[in-house]
Amino acid sequence: MSRTSRTSRTVSAIEAESYAILRSRVDTSALAPWTRAVVERVVHATADPGYVDDLVCHEPVLDAAADALAGGAPVVADVGMVAAGVTARRAVCHVADPAAASLAERAGLTRSAAAVRLAHEEVGPGAVWVVGCAPTALEEVLAYGVDPALVVGLPVGFVGAAASKAALRASGLPAVSNVSEKGGSAVAAAAVNALLYREVDA
């Protein structure tokens, strides 16, 4: 496992207390280090301990993704709220780009899916793709043939969200996902922030 130092930051007293409460209610001590970092940050961000059993993480994948991020891998977000939530790195997000609207109309895509195509042209292989809102964006990541360092696939909703996450897990791509229909921008951003911020030593 990597010993690479990540972005450092000051932990507030409130955040420290929140993590103490979390750990008093849910035992995450048996989880592997990067998996625990991701799971705890998601639970902290949502106050939903159900994510402990809902998230699907693979420790070697997370370790490699954390190294990629430490090495400067681009982060691509499906929507502005995800991009805003990734606090240690400027995320590429083209959903509000007029070119995305134009491409969406021409190609019969949602704007989020069109933004995936634009972002892929910009970042190429080796990026971390973070989807927290639009299942169609995750579907486009899978269909467009990106070569990612990681796909954080945590879209929320009753239409397409769980199915798109199941397709991500079946794809064989390096990924973080969850089984249920829940998810969202804060959840996806929390997962990638765990890899950007946390220092984990083997």
Image (cartoon, grey):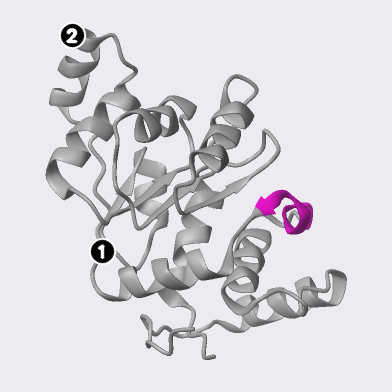
Residue 37 position within the rendered picture, expressed as x and y whole percent measured from the top left: 59, 73
Q: Which image quarter holds the C terminus? A: bottom right
Residue 12 position within the rendered picture, expressed as x and y whole percent measured from the top left: 55, 82
The crowding category of the residue bearing disc 1, from other C-alpha atoms within 10 Å (few below 14, some 14 to 19, many at least 20), is many
Kind of element beneath mark 1: loop
Q: Which residues are magenta?
A: 49-55
Query: Can you say whether 64 is above or below 166 in the image?
Result: below
Left or right: 20, with 32 as reference point: right
Residue under pointer 1: 73
**Mark toward the start of the polypeptide (2 vs 1):** 1
The crowding category of the residue bearing disc 2, from other C-alpha atoms within 10 Å (few below 14, some 14 to 19, many at least 20), is few
Left or right: 21, with 185 as reference point: right
Image-quadrant location for residue 69: bottom left
Judge by depth and name the residue closer to the eye, 11 or 72: 72
Query: For the point 58% across and 62% down, which residue is it?
Result: 58
Query: For the point 44% across and 48% down, which residue is it?
Result: 173
Q: Is residue 53 magenta?
A: yes
Q: Decide: marks 2, 1 in contact (CB < 8 A)?
A: no
Residue 51 position within the rendered picture, expressed as x and y whole percent measured from the top left: 72, 53
- Amino acid at the residue labelled 1: Ala
Residue 5 position within the rendered picture, expressed as x and y whole percent measured from the top left: 38, 88
Query: For the point 65% across and 82% down, which residue is it?
Result: 16
Left or right: 119, with 187 as reference point: left
Query: Can you say whether 133 is above or below 10 in the image?
Result: above
Kind of element beneath mark 2: helix
Left or right: 67, with 103 as reference point: right
Q: Is residue 184 magenta?
A: no
Image-quadrant location for residue 196: bottom left
Residue under pointer 2: 106
Query: For the point 60% across and 66% down, which residue is it?
Result: 41
